[in-house]
Image: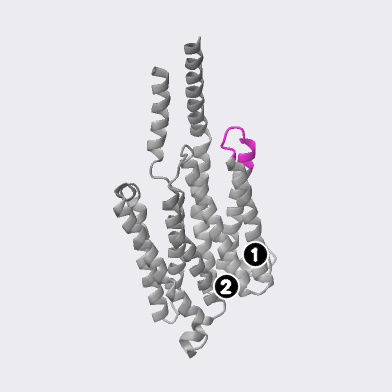
Amino acid sequence: MVFESKLSCKIIGFIHLINSQLYKSKYLPFFKRLGSHSVFALIALIVIGGATRVMEAGLACPDWPLCYGSFLPLSHMNLRVFLEWFHRLDAFLVGVLILFKFALSIIWKNQIPNWLPKTYSLLLFLVIVQGSFGALTVINLLDSYTVTGHLLIAFLLLITTISINQNLENDEIEEPLIWWRLLLFVPLLLTLIQSFIGVRLSSTWSAHICLSFNKQCLILNTHKLFAFPITFSILLIIATAIYKRSLLTENWKYLSALIFLLFSQIFLGFLSLKTNLNEPIFIIGHQLNASLFIAILTTLIFRNPYTKKGLNHSLNSQMFGINS
């Protein structure tokens, strides 16, 4: 009798695990694909926003949410109007995509992890705040703090979206590498602070004033100095991964990209200053690099290198329990 009871428990546990994998194959891959599209759209949104700021096109559309009173202002279209219009269009599409994911998570809430609808609700809230800041940038005539807040919320959207994607991949993980995540969080936080300083630098014209008249150089010098602790923290991460060979083996693609982006970011910053910020391509590339840098750091923070091993171990444990 006791043997039959134990056997029943083992079988029920195994069936539950198999059902878990079945619903994942049915629903979660769909959310993962939508999440990947969201990441690309958000990076594009940040880069286009940077291009809009660099080209001084933030007020090219004097009204909001329409542009010159229409959805497609063909009669007023030029490069600056196109940048601002396309930036708003991309933001609208990102908002629709996140709203769609939130709606699906409510519809399928009984077949997906409990945390997913809650996290999508947070993502939807950030989209609403982001849209509000977008309106305020026009209403407040590109106020520096509003522009800065607009970018930082975009980065929070990117970080949250990537964390959702990685948590979907790591749904079976019970003990993530906390110390590894904390180590990676340091350069992520420093990069966000440096991005904050960078937007303040461009939105207050401090860089031009410093380079032209050697005045108000505090913001520019602070922005440059932040490259040192970020570089040191990345090198520390690489050294730790080399010491813990398994981390290097599982994450070498991400770590290699991180090193490449770090030094290319420094190089682009150097070129931007050498050209007195007169070459938009360097500044836009600088913004793109920062977005990719944050995306890869976030991926490493929420990615567990032992996901597949943990899943196989779970299945093998259930099989061993039934056999015994």
First in sequence, mark 1 or 2: give its number: 2
Q: Compared with residue 275, is residue 193 higher up or lower down, i.e. above or below?
A: above
Q: Residue furthest top?
A: 1
Q: Residue at x 35, y 61 (%)?
A: 236
Residue that appears at 52% across and 76% down: 201
Where is residue 308 drawn, in percent x and y?
A: 39, 37
Q: Report the span colored magenta.
A: 103-114
Q: Is residue 255 above or below residue 263?
A: above
Residue name at image x 41 percent, y 28 percent: 315
**Whether residue 2 is situated above or below residue 35 in the rendered picture:** above
Pointer 2 local density, CA inside 10 Å: few below 14, some 14–19, many at least 20: some
Foreground residue among 122 and 71: 122
**Which sits in the foreground, 118 or 74?**
118
Q: Is residue 63 left or right of residue 180?
A: right
User: Mark 1, residues whose alpha carbon is within 10 Å: few (<14), some, or many (≥20)?
Assistant: many
Q: Which mark is residue 57?
A: 2
Q: Position of residue 295 (x, y in %)?
A: 46, 56
Q: Nearer the viewer, mark 1 or mark 2?
A: 1
Tell whether 37 sits left or right of 282: right
Residue 110 lies in magenta, yes or no?
yes
Q: Position of residue 262 (x, y in %)?
A: 38, 65
Give residue 296's mark. Answer: none
Point out the residue furthest to the bottom here. Answer: 213
The Cα atoms of the two marked residues, 1 and 2, are separated by: 16 Å
Q: Mark 2 belongs to which amino acid? A: Ala
Please, what secondary structure does the residue beneath circle 2 have?
loop
Q: Are marks 1 and 2 in contact (CB under 8 Å)?
A: no
Mark 1 — residue? 133
Can you give x and y, in whole percent of width and height, for residue 115 in the image?
58, 41
Q: In the shown orientation, is residue 211 left or right of residue 58? A: left
Identity of the residue drawn at 43% across and 75% down: 225
